[in-house]
Image: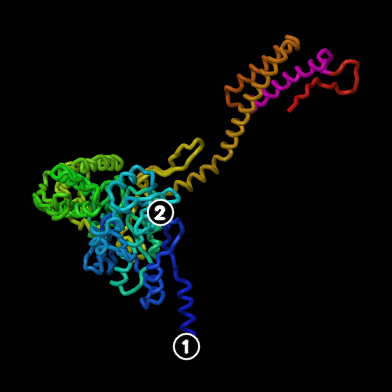
Amino acid sequence: MATAALLRSIRRREVASTPFSPFKYLSSNGKTSSNASYLVQNWKRAFSSKPAGNDVIGIDLGTTNSCVAVMEGKNPKVIENAEGARTTPSVVAFNPKGELLVGTPAKRQAVTNPTNTLFGTKRLIGRKFDDPQTQKEMKMVPYKIVRAPNGDAWVEANGQQYSPSQVGAFVLTKMKETAEAYLGKSVKKAVVTVPAYFNDAQRQATKDAGRIAGLDVERIINEPTAAALSYGMTNKEGLIAVFDLGGGTFDVSVLEISNGVFEVKATNGDTFLGGEDFDNALLDFLVNEFKTSEGIDLAKDRLALQRLREAAEKAKIELSSTSQTEINLPFITADASGAKHFNITLTRSRFETLVNHLIERTRDPCKNCLKDAGISAKEVDEVLLVGGMTRVPKVQNVVAEIFGKTPSKGVNPDEAVAMGAALQGGILRGDVKELLLLDVTPLSLGIETLGGVFTRLIGRNTTIPTKKSQKMVRDAELHAQKDKERKDLIDTKNTADTTIYSIEKSLGEYREKIPSEVAKEIEDAVADLRSALSGDDLNEIKAKIDAANKAVSKIGEHMSGGGSAPGGGSQGGSDQTPEADYEEVKK
């Protein structure tokens, strides 16, 4: 009995400490609800027999696919998911029963359930609803993108609203469970990668996603940097350029690898350029072709459009290795004359023409990155290709043109980033001591100063961590006295301006009532004060202000009738203070 009571007590404490509702979302009526499936999942986890682990896993949270790796000794290993694949589609869906599907199962049912299947949400993370890129994305996806109470871009599925961080958390949870199944113990710590050109809001939103998934995100690192880590672990050295064109984002970084030190020289990119855009370009072409031949606009049919989208993605992949492919979709739609079929042969040259403008957009970031790094393309020893889109032959040709050399295929474009993240996890744990990473901040950091002006404190491509802020505090302390003197001078000059304005106004009003020599004395005092204002002698300005005030006080003396007496005293030697003229102003 005592043992049973003890077990019940322990279980009550475990359940009480379980985060029952880390996922919060808004229902259609605006009320906050909890995710029931996640509640059950966490409840089960409270009674899990898995021992707590100290591993730091590496996760590549991609736009289209995600990957997880873990350190085995001093080498990273990519872990296969429950379906046996080494990468997992970053797709989340809710079936008609309200069940949550993540990864391959979610992607399989997208054709029949397009409005409740969420993909590519990484491009929305940390973005506002009114952002032009968000508005552009709304026209490209079958699910709803809605405005959140704080103005952010959220998505809607199955009648509920989710933030992109929550959707990312579903994928991260899948990655976490994949790692736990392989390791046989619970995982709490992770290194998560993000596009190098993500801003601070997007990075924080990614950390939020990890926190929601039950992970302590030890470090957020840039995807090109992670890829370079996995490449350089074999003691390779030199100047390396990483060209990372993934499913939704594009980054390019220049690194110097020497004696195990990975120093990022510069980074650049475009957070809205990737495989999704290539798919959309091909999708638009297919829709227009069918509209021309059959007179039916498939863009208005969500089911047909989703079938076309999947066909476009498959065709894009096939054209990386073949010169042409056939897209054959029977019963794509129907009209009064009967069922319609879609059949078209697509050549690689035609595909390259359709996406050429997207590929050309990678040139400027590469040139800017080289410029910021202070090197020429000839000085780059090797160019690494990362991301699935770098398998497109036209992309490889453009990279060769930009850098003047054939790009290397020494890393797996789908797995290199996750492996690099796992390596960084090993560095943080102390398992890997031969490597040191010196990353940079991709965007300038600053503060808002008077007038809403952005004042830059830390320039882009500054090696982090940096001590700029601490240095500014010390500088402020060193120059505190100078700052005070400067403030006193400005305040005194403002007082002088006010004094001149007041004196000139009084002189203009009473000039006819005072002797000319008094008016002349006042004008001279004002002129002297103006002259002193042109300089920065604080004491002189103060002296001239006093002199001007003394001169103008004679107006009052003469107006009170005491102007003829020496020293401004009253006539007859009376001790009574003369009363000044006044007029009552009715309010």
Q: Is residue 239 visible?
A: no
Q: Is residue 405 left or right of residue 145?
A: left
- Give the mark nearest the N terminus, 1 or 2: 1
Instruction: Tell me which amino acid carries mark 1.
Output: Thr
Q: Report the front residue among 257 and 44.
A: 44
Magenta-tinted stretch: 539-568
Please tell me in which quadrant of the rendered image residue 270 appears: top left
Q: Report the front residue among 64 and 52.
A: 64
Tell me the residue at 23%/68% (across/down). 83
In the image, residue 7 above or below residue 129: below
Distance from the alpha carbon under mark 1 to that under mark 2? 46 Å
In the image, residue 357 above or below residue 71: above
Helix, strand or loop at label 1? It is: helix
Give the residue at the far bottom of this rendering.
Answer: 1
Q: Give the residue pinned by disc 2.
A: 204
Q: Report the front residue among 8 and 79.
A: 8
Is 545 contained in the magenta span? yes
Is 18 contained in the magenta span? no
Instruction: Tell me which amino acid carries mark 2.
Output: Gln
Please tell me in which quadrant of the rendered image residue 65 appears: bottom left
Tell me the residue at 36%/54% (across/down). 155
Q: Main secondary structure of the magenta part?
A: helix
Q: Give the residue pinned by disc 1.
A: 3
